[in-house]
Image (cartoon, rainbow, N blue to C red):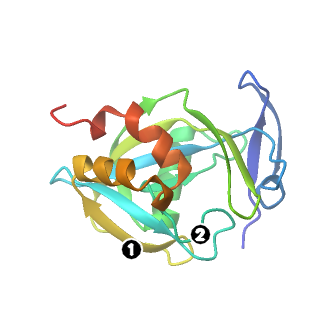
Amino acid sequence: MEELDVVLLSDTGEPIGSQSKALVHTTDTALHLAFSCHLFNDQGQVLVTRRAMSKITWPGVWTNSFCGHPQPGEDPLDAIRRHAEVELGCKIEDLQIQLPDFRYRAVDASGIVENEICPVYTARLVGELQPNPAEVVDWQWVNPQDLAQSVDATPWAFSPWLVEQRPQLRIYHAGL
């Protein structure tokens, strides 16, 4: 498997170095750069995915369509397109930023910490999905308002970043 790095950030969000992705997620995770993407189909449904059981953090938990980390020096939009192909086996278009300053810190039941500045994007699916089983164990296309209701009713069943993003994203508000 290819060794990937993440971009380490200062408290103000400035890049200050990089570290191996395999080493950065610990019980004392340094602040680093990531992204989240909510993928839509032509029917206006949003893709939710269930994280593979082999994931270090939040295995088996339902989350937004896909997430990832840009490589040092990589354009964030290129990173999102790369992850769409690696994780979901798909192409995307109409990539748009929704929450440029989203930031969260969460601790998994295992004690592993996620500590990210994580801009949030939306995109539209081109073609078909072919999810990578090392990344995604299950997936479903759902109405955005139905997902919002599910997240609000059972936040423990979803990733903490989706729970925190949901009220901030207009895409999950009825009538918008």
Q: Are marks 1 and 2 in contact (CB under 8 Å)?
A: no
Residue occupying the point 36% across, 52% down:
153
Q: Is residue 150 above or below residue 102?
A: below
Above or below residue 49? Residue 161 is above
The kind of residue tagged 2 is Pro
* Element assignment for label 1: loop
Horizontally, residue 112 falls left or right of residue 41, namely: right
Residue 7, image quadrant: top right
- Quadrant assignment for the C terminus: top left
Task: Work out which residue is located at the far top of the displayed protein and give it.
Answer: 12
Which is more toward the observer, 15 or 136? 136
Which residue is at a point 42% across and 64% down the rendered structure image? 49
Query: What crowding class fits label 1: few (fewer than 14 Cα within 10 Å), some (14-19), or many (20 or more)?
Result: few
- The residue under label 2 is 59
Can the viewer see residue 63? yes
Q: Which mark is residue 55?
A: none
- Choose mark 1 or mark 2, whichever is in front: 2
Give percent across and percent down for residue 10: 79, 27
Quarter of the rendering occupied by the N terminus: bottom right
Residue at (82% x, 54% y) in the render: 27
Residue 8, image x and y in percent? 78, 38
Q: Nearer the viewer, residue 41 or 51?
A: 51
Task: Give the x, y percent position of residue 114.
Answer: 69, 49
- The tally of labels here is 2
Question: In the figure, is residue 74 to the left or right of 61?
Answer: right
Q: Which residue is mark 1?
A: 130
Local secondary structure at mark 2: loop
Residue 78 horizontal side relative to residue 88, left or right:
right
Which callout, 1 or 2, points at the residue further toward the start of the chain?
2
- The answer to whether one can see residue 124 in this image is no
Structural distance between the alpha carbons of marks 1 and 2 = 20 Å
Q: Is residue 150 above or below residue 72?
A: below
